Structures are given as structure tokens and as C-alpha cells.
Amino acid sequence: MIKSFRLRLTAWYLAFFSLLFLIFSVFLYGVLSRALEKRLDESLAAQAVTTAGLFQDELEEMHGDAPLAAANVVSDMRVPDGAIAVFEKTRLLAAGGPVPARQLEGIAAAPAGMIGVSYGKYGARAAVHRLATSGRDFLIVALAPRDSIAAELGVVRRSLFFALPLLVALAGLGGYVLASRSLAPLGWMAEQAHKITDSNLDARLEIGDAAQELAVLAASFNALLSRLDRSFESMRRFVADASHELRTPISVIRGEADVALSHQRSAAEYQETLAIILDESRRLSRLVDDLLNLARADAGRVRLQVQEFYLNDLLAECCRAAQTLAGARRIDLECRPGDDVAFRGDEELLRRLVMNLLDNAIRYTPPGGKVSAALEQEGTHLRIRVSDTGVGIAADAAPHVFERFYRADKARSRQDGGFGLGLSIVKWIAESHNGDVVLASRPGSGSTFTVSLPRD
């Protein structure tokens, strides 16, 4: 099997051209053959009609002497390599030409018109014309062999046979050149693509004024490079941010352990150090769990534990759990779970979604502020709204709040113990339930996160 696409394209082009030329040759040969046959038939018919007219005139001049009139007419008329014959009924009166008399006598009973005759190497054609005059019936025959037609068709066949190899060779050469020129942009694209690595994913393919199909291919490849570039950049940023977040609690744990072991301390000091280490370990464990869940989500390995439960009860339980944190910050937490609403989904993941939204709202709301959570039914969707009267989110930061490790106020989030993963997890959980989450916020006026979930 041919591996080269250029050669394969040339072979297909050559096969198609050869088939097309063969069909054309057969068509041309058939048309020419019919044209030559028609020309011979018309010539013979004209000869027969002319002979009949002359014979009728001679018959009148010879006072009805048919054999003499026929002999005079036949001597004046000539058909190349053929014959002219005059019959009275089935009796041959006169004939001229190289055709044997027995061959002509076999035509005497033929109907008027054009007939084929078995004579010569390629057969013959005969025009039969009947003449009735002076109460007598005569038959005029003009016969010619098909040798001249066969000779002309032979010239055409030889011309086609000689032309076919030459034309096929020229077509193959032309097809190869055309294929090479058409595929040249693919070579340029391959050369450029070979130079693109993870260090220069911002490079793009340039193909100039190539064909539209190749331009579409280059555009698709460039779009793929753009997606890869964004993915690699997101991965680099994710690794850098994760490393930074992991380094902080590890550094605290290591520092506290070094200080505690540097010299003998009291039991109270050891307890204080262990409390700090435990707090940082919990923070580190929570970060690792978040990273593991997001990694599993990216790999598509998280399976929802779908069951039926009441979403309003889940919202009420989350509000009760968040009440302690809200009270410690002197924030009014209002919960409006509404009537019973049955829902099928992963209860634990949705509980985490609500808790992340409440935790985020409480952390960004100053003391004396208000946080509200409500469950609403709108057509075929359920909407969980969590609003706060906090600092709000700037317009330029709003599109990025669902990105991993993104913080609109990095110093504040780190101080409050946030990692910048909570809203990323919220978005993932909502999308895993075929829903979405939308942010509406104005700086200084608070924010509202709306999670929309379709009901089965």
C-alpha cells in the first residue's frame, strides 16, 4: 500500500484521468463509427436513387429494352470497390463492379432500404431502391464494402492507442506537480509545528495564502495551541499556587517543632505549640483534600452518590452549622429554606457547596453586616441564593473568582484561612449536577451567588 499521501493522490488522479480518457475514447469511437456508417448509407442511397432516375430515362429512350437500358446505366455509374445492379423482379439485368453476381442475386428479394450484406472482410452495406414504371417492377441496388470505414476507424484506434500512454504520462507528471504544490503548505505547517514546544506555546502557524481547506486546518491547529497554552499556563499557575499554599502551613509546623525542640519547655508551652501544629495540620489536610477532589474532578473519576433528599432541609442545616462562625464575627445570618423541596443529587457535595458559599460570604462581610441564604423554585430549576453586605468584588476581578487559588484580596483571604479553592469547588459541584453558578456584585454593596440546579 502506498504510504505517501502525495503519491496516493497522484495515483487516484491518474486513475480517474485514465478512466475519463477511456470513456471519452469509447464515446468518440462510437460517434465516429456511426457517422461513417451514416455517410456511407447516405452515399449509397443517393447512388441508388440517381441510378433509378437514369434507368427510367434510358428505358424510355430504348423503347422498353430493359437489359440494354440497364447496361447503359450501369456502365455510367461507379461505386468505389462496390457495385451497381439492376434487377427486373428477381432477374439480374446488368451489374457493374467487382462484386460476384451470385452475391448480388441474393439481394433481389430484400425489402427497400439499407441492408447489411456479408461481403468482404468487414461486410458491406447495400441500398435497395424499387422502381415501378411502364407496368414493370425493377430493383436498383448500390453496394459498397465497409473496408473504407474500417480503415478510417483503424487510424483512429491507432491514434488513441499511441496517445493514451503519452497522455497518461503527462497526466501523472502534472498530477504529481499539482499534488506537491497543493501539499506544500502541509510541509510548512509540519516544520513550524515541530518547532513549537511547551516553552513557546504562544507561537502560531503561518501558511500565507494557502487554500481555504488548509487555512481551516491551520486555524483549528492554532485554536488547539491556544487551548493548550491556556491549559499549560493554568497548570503552571496551579502548581505554583499549590506549592505556595502548601509551603506556608508546612513552614509553620516545622518552625514550631524546631522552636519546641530547641530547649526544654513547660507543659503549657508544649501544649500551645502542639495546638498551633494541630491547627496548621488541619488547614493543610483541608487544602490537600480540596486539591485531591479537584484533581479527581479534572480526571473524571468522581462519581456522584445520587439519592433523593430535601434540599430545603440541607440549606437549613448548613445555616445552623454556619451560625457559630457568623455569631463570632457579629454577622446576622438569615436563612429562608422555604417549603419542602425534594431533589435527587449528591447530598454531601451539595452540602459542601452551600457551606463554601456561606463561609465565603461570612469571611468577606464586616462585623455588623448581614448574610442571607434562600432556596427558590423557578420553573424547572431550583436556585440557591447566598447574599452578603460585604465588600463586594471589583468588576475586573469578577470573571476570575471561580479560578483556582484566585483571590480578589489575597492578604485578607490568607489571614482568614482561605485557599482560593472554595468557589472553584462550588462551580465544579454545580456543573457536575448539570447546573451553574452566577455572581452578581458591586464593590461596597456586597455580592450574590446564585446556584441554578435543574430538577429531574
Image (cartoon, rainbow, N blue to C red):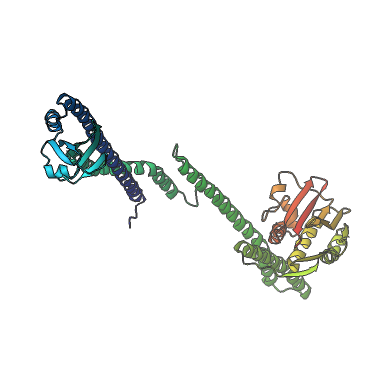
Against 301, is 208 above or below? Answer: above
Q: Can residue 350 be seen here? A: yes
In depth, the one of 134 and 58 nearer the eye is 134
Q: Is residue 359 left or right of residue 199?
A: right
Quarter of the picture holding the N terminus = bottom left
Whether 354 is drawn above or below 97: the answer is below
Residue ID at (68%, 67%) = 289
* Quadrant placement of the C terminus: bottom right
Along the viewing direction, whichever of 241 and 310 lies nearer the viewer: 310
Give the quarter of the image for residue 89. top left
91 or 159: nearer the eye? 91
Q: Position of residue 192 (x, y in %)?
A: 43, 46
- Give residue 423's position: percent from left, percent from top: 72, 57
Observer-nearest residue: 257 or 354? 354
Residue 81 in view, yes or no:
no
Q: Is residue 145 above or below residue 343?
A: above
- The picture quadrant where one finds residue 86 is top left
Location of residue 347 in the rendering, given as x and y in whole percent from the top left corner: 76, 68
Q: Residue furthest bottom?
A: 267
Residue 118 location (% of width, % of height): 18, 46
Q: Residue at x 38, y 44 (%)?
A: 183
Q: In the figure, is residue 290 to the left or right of 68?
A: right
